[in-house]
Image: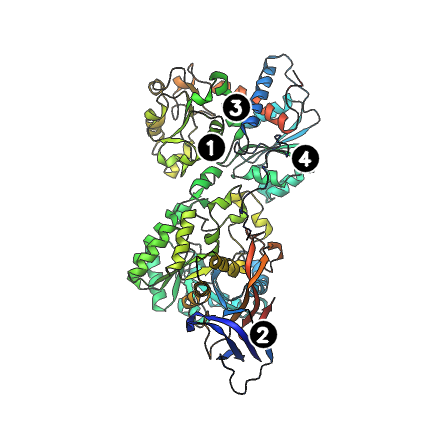
Amino acid sequence: MSLEILKARLIIPNLGLDETGNVYIKQGKIVAIGRKPAGFKANKSIDAKGLILIPGIVDLGVRLGLGGEEYSSGITNEGKAAAKGGITSIACFPDTGPILDTVGEVDFLLHHPTTKTKINILPIGAITKGLAGSELTEMANLKQAGCVGVGNAWQPLKNTLVTRRAFEYAASNDLTVFIHPEDHALMAGGCAHEGMVATRLGLPGIPEAAETTAIGGLLPLIEQTGVKAHFCRLSTRIGQNMIRRAQYDGANITADVSINQLFLTEMDLMDFNPLAHTRPPLRTQLDQQALRSALENNSLQAISSDHLPLSRDNKLDAFPSTLPGISGFETLLSLSLKLVEEKVLTLAQAVSLLCTGPGEIVGGEAGQLSVGGKADITLFDSNDEWLCEPQRFISNGKNSPYAGWSMPGKVTHTISNGRVIYTA
Amino acid sequence: MTRPQVGSLAVNQQLTSDGKLKHLLSIEGLNIGILNEILDTAESFSSIANQSVKKVPLLRGKTIFNLFFEDSTRTRTTFELAGKRLSADMLSMNLKASSTNKGETLLDTLNNLQAMYSDMFIVRHQDSGAAQFIAQHVAPHISVINAGDGRHSHPTQALLDMFTIRRHKKDFTRLRVAIVGDILHSRVARSQIHALNMLNTGEVRVVAPRTLLPAAIENLGVNVYHDIDAGVKDADVIIMLRLQKERMHGALIPSENEYFQRYGLNQRRLKLANKNALVMHPGPVNRGVEISSAVADGPQSTILEQVSHGLAVRMAVMSLCLGSSGGQHE
């Protein structure tokens, strides 16, 4: 199987490349970028004139469903939804279905026939057994089984001693810990940002300090244990400042932001819109501006879809009783291109934040393109616009607050391991 | 590039396209015209209580369900009595103990009740936003009245309080109103604040320790006081809120005793307010926790009056929502 992509605008941040050119692929690998190798014969040729070619998008930390039953049947379908969004690698949180705390569960996710998908699944293993927060998992074995990192998802660790041991053990195995910075006592019962809108709607609040005290408590342990830490879904201006300062001081940490925090705020909850129910909650305009600037100045390394497909019933209730989450695979790239339109980012920066940035966090070849390397590629037409109609999503989750938004940029081809897995 | 605001509703859900009251979900979204219409209608109903025949045929043939997902005695019985006085068929359901505990969803419960040809749902629910949610999902001919949702709103309580104030004080623009106590958990306080501001009240104050105040409350148009003496000074109306006894467990206050010392309304503090200041309380009263018995039972207290006004105001709201205002019965 060989494939040639001709006359695309190649934006490949790891090569510092932004120019029109060709890419040649054979047996899942890139054999040349630029000039056609001698004797290369393509089975398939894509005329990519006017299209932009980037490394396949890497989505850091998604959930493929909350229920164990829907999970296995869901993976194949969610993989197709990801491909439609130009995403070729997804890191799954350990609470994505059955808890990823044993080699058996990781093997099932990666290899069982019922969980077949054409995109790359990068599991994040549980850092404690059953995510219960007290006993360590077999992290070395989880790593060998294919986990790209460990974490405790939305569950708290029992105390600072367990946290310390978990970080030390993860560091010994050179595993990155994925952290949701949340102080559970401060979050208790909350479902919206504690501020003007929650006060008006009478919704129990989640204060900014739920994030910042969690970050503040963990930074010294990260420093002392030397573990590589990734903070998922920063939502506050102050939290982001703490991360930036720590990075400046040389801490081994990275962080990402959900695309939703960059476009929505607490104001979008008005009239109790359950589609704007997220975790962490949508924050203020001020937080949003700070997070947008943090993308520009490189203190955030990745943008995530924060994909969490939910059923209609999960959102069909009074706001506090609905589940938080947004189905995000199919709008991630377009919303990121909107940031380019709004001059928050350059196109090259956006591609870095979607591909190279998250790729470096999970390690391996994800998010990069090079001769001899794996051919995970996304092609899109930046001039095409589409209307967001969530009922037409491939994803099982139609829970998107972006219905009716006009979306810039449309994926035309998604290529995983050298094979075209999606065409528009 | 279109970007509709995600949460915005195209139309005001509470009013019909020609501006009539359809649902009563919160004070926000009403206008001064509707608010005064409710109060005026309530005024005409309040005289019925003194007649020997206390029933009017305005809602004859209408079926009204009291759907209480949360405990209540006073509000539920007043609504029930109001419905009966208007000649409607009233059914009260204590849903806390029934279907929703058997795993039926809120929407399934509603659909079942809708199938019984109801015209109005009166809803109390522990979740903020429940009344809105129900109004969005019921059949178009059904009116929804919010009898309290989470910490969000309790519009009929606020309206009966406004009715009571209006009875005693003529001009809201000259009034200084202090709301004292657990604002954080209070749907009553939120509705009162909106109603008072809609009526252009001179000054609205909230008085509480920081632990019992929601974030950014000043955005609702109130002045914040942490000291009750300063907060009730020169006030024309003092509204005391009920302090739930279990609040100590959430580390919100140290003890009932200290709360009463720091935030309870006693006769000494009442003297700091203007002469003839009204003392109000939505009930049920915790004597010796938020208010002394002498004040609660004193000449300036309107606590029992509020309860009887509740009946007139609820009759007004129910009849207006179902399209038959007062007038006819006079």
Residue A47: mark: 2
Amino acid tagged 1: Arg
Give the CA distance from mark 1 to mark 3: 14 Å
Q: Using the image, determine if residue B245 lies above or below residue A165.
A: above
Give the CA distance from mark 2 to mark 3: 72 Å
Q: Under tag 1, what secondary structure?
A: helix
- Residue A96, can we see it? no
Residue A113 in the image, given as x and y percentages of width and height: 58, 70
Q: Nearer the viewer, residue A101 or A410?
A: A410
Residue B76 in the image, given as x and y percentages of width and height: 57, 28
Q: Quadrant of the C terminus of chain A?
A: bottom right
Give the CA distance from mark 1 to mark 2: 61 Å
Q: Residues within 10 Å of mark 1 (few under 14, many from 20)?
A: many
Q: Which residue is mark 3?
A: B160
Residue A51: mark: none
Q: Residues within 10 Å of mark 4 (few under 14, many from 20)?
A: few
Q: Under tag 2, what secondary structure?
A: strand
Comparing labels 2 and 3, the label whose residue is closer to the camera: 2
Q: Residue at x 54, y 50 (%)?
A: B3
Give the CA distance from mark 2 to mark 4: 58 Å
Amino acid tagged 2: Asp
State the image quarter where residue A370 is shown. bottom left
Q: Which residue is mark 4?
A: B141
Comparing labels 2 and 4, the label whose residue is closer to the camera: 2
